[in-house]
């Protein structure tokens, strides 16, 4: 992927052949046929071996992988083995039925000393057109067992059992899909049976939405989050505190529909009035009193992109997001389905018509154009980089491969033209999205885990990229 072509085209909610192809660098393309096609018509074993180039990650770690693929004569069993230069490896064994549907996937991570660090077992059951996949992961490094249930590839629930060596007892984290799109309900049941609600999404009969979050990361950093929306507008109250109680970030947003032609949006008390006209709109900064006028054609890539759906979408955007695009000369074009992906490329953004997705891509645009005194963008900023790498290291140390798969977009050590900046690029963009709106349902798991376990990264990003100053 080109250094300026980055986006939200990864669906972390589905685990299967797509993930396998990605991890194998595409070398299984020939051996993973489309459904109902003939598998391995020559009825011979397939063995493929490939080495990836040497590279060094941002922490100075040295990497060189050897990937080996084995496919049985009937195509029903396949093995993918990835071996690092130090001898550690991940072995994935796949089993398919006569119709080439996946039945089981067993994954083992083995240390350079031959010790099994975790085992995960993905079993899929079929009832007509409905498939249920149960993923059981045992992580021997963290004394954690995770059981995840997906229905037709979509997340349903997860139970994480963790062992506390100080008490000798287990505690549980239970996560379920909430009635609110993009939001997970989660609670923690401690060793004594006490229950703490850490995330909940509530949808009223009138369509109103309330979201509350109270997260604590590995080092005790706290996230306090409240979001409310109704037909009158929305508001967000978002604070992050260090483990000593110091406030690291405070972001407030509001959006109100004043009349059919007039809206009000604000970021940290900095208000904007948006007035619609026949062919566009004007934005008045209520602090500086500056007023700017835009035609809808100023926002979209070309006249053919100016559809009624796109105009309606533009009329929902917060003023600071529009101004960030306009100041950088970036035009947008929209797609009808979220799975069509989104990207930022130079002066264009492709996006699904929701605020979170556009805010993610706008985060890339800000990242590449926001330089400090040393001409570094946010990805290269020393403060942000250190905070992110520290939180990334803690996550990888304490979580299983199941949770790591949810946020693999941010854990990448190396990818395409962006090299070792790939994962951190995406983390900067995601921080901007989380600071702007609630996620599309397509990204509910990755946004949940990123918001919970990377609070200091989000706080650091807010200081570097938000249009208006953080209030303390």
Image: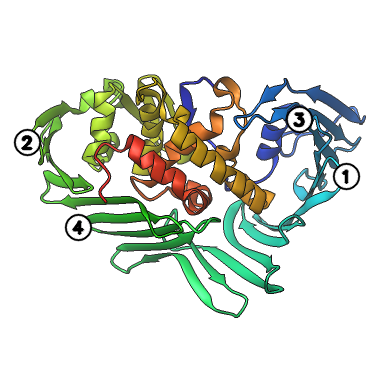
In the image, taking residue 119 as reference, residue 208 lies left or right, namely left
Please name the residue shown 66% across and 38% down the image. Answer: 18
Which badge, 2 or 4, is on the more N-terminal residue? 4
Instruction: Determine which of the numbered discs, if any, sits on residue 289 in the image.
Output: 2
Identify the residue at horizontal 34%, vertical 42% (top origin): 355
Label 3 or label 4, whichever comes before in sequence order:
3
Question: How far is the residue under mark 1 from the one under mark 2?
Answer: 67 Å
Say which residue appears at 65% left-offset and 54% top-offset. Answer: 129
Comparing labels 1 and 2, the label whose residue is closer to the camera: 1
- Dot 2 or dot 3: first in sequence order is 3
Give the labeled residue for mark 1: 114
Say which label, 3 or 1, has the lower sequence index: 3
Location of residue 157 in the rendering, given as x and y in whole percent from the top left corner: 59, 62
Q: Of circles 2 and 3, which is in front?
A: 2
**Position of 135 relative to 9 (above/below):** below
Q: Secondary structure at mark 1?
A: loop
Secondary structure type for disc 4: loop
Residue behind mark 3: 28
- Disc nearest the viewer among 2 and 4: 2
Disc 2 is placed on an element classified as loop
Q: Look at 15% across and 46% down and name the residue there.
A: 263
Neighbours of disc 1 within 10 Å: few (<14), some (14-19), many (20+): few
Residue placed most toward the observer, 186 or 54: 54
First in sequence: mark 1 or mark 2? 1
Choose mark 1 or mark 4, whichever is in front.
1
């Amino acid at each position: 992927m080109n250094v300026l072509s980055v986006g939200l085209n990864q669906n972390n909610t589905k685990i299967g052949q797509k993930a396998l192809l990605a991890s194998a660098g595409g070398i299984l393309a020939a051996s993973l046929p489309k459904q109902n096609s003939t598998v391995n018509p020559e009825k011979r074993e397939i063995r493929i071996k490939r080495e990836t180039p040497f590279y060094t990650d941002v922490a100075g770690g040295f990497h060189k992988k050897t990937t080996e693929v084995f496919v049985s004569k009937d195509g029903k069993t396949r093995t993918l083995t990835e071996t690092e230069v130090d001898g550690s490896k991940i072995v994935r064994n796949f089993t398919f039925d006569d119709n080439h549907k996946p039945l089981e996937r067993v994954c083992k991570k083995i240390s350079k000393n031959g010790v099994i660090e975790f085992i995960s077992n993905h079993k899929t059951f079929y009832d007509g057109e409905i498939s249920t996949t149960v993923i059981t992961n045992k992580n021997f490094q963290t004394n954690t067992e995770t059981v995840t249930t997906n229905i037709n590839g979509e997340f349903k629930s997860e139970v994480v059992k963790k062992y506390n060596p100080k008490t000798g007892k287990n505690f549980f984290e239970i996560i379920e899909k909430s009635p609110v799109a993009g939001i997970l309900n989660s609670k923690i049941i401690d060793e004594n049976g006490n229950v703490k609600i850490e995330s909940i999404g509530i949808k009223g009969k009138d369509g109103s939405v309330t979201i509350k979050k109270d997260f604590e990361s590995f080092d005790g950093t706290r996230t306090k989050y409240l979001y409310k929306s109704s037909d009158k507008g929305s508001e967000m109250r978002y604070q992050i505190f260090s483990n000593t109680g110091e406030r690291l970030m405070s972001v407030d947003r509001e959006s109100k529909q004043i009349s059919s032609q007039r809206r009000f949006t604000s970021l940290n008390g900095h208000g904007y009035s948006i007035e619609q006209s026949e062919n566009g709109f004007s934005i008045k900064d209520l602090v500086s009193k500056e007023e700017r006028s835009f035609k809808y054609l100023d926002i979209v890539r070309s006249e053919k992109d100016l559809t009624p759906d796109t105009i309606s979408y533009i009329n929902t955007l917060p003023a600071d997001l529009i101004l960030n695009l306009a100041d950088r000369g970036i035009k947008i074009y929209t797609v009808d389905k979220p799975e069509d992906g989104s990207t930022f490329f130079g002066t264009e953004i492709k996006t699904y018509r929701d605020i979170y997705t556009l805010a993610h891509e706008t985060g890339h645009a800000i990242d590449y154009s926001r330089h400090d005194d040393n001409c570094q963008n946010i990805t290269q900023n020393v403060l942000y980089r250190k905070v992110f790498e520290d939180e990334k290291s803690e996550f990888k140390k304490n979580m299983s491969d199941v949770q790591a798969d949810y946020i693999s977009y941010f854990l990448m050590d190396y990818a395409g033209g962006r090299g070792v900046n790939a994962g951190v690029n995406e983390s900067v963009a995601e921080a901007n999205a989380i600071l702007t709106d609630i996620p599309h349902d397509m990204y509910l798991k990755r946004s949940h885990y990123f918001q919970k376990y990377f609070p200091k990264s989000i706080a650091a990003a807010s200081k570097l990229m938000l249009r208006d100053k953080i209030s303390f």
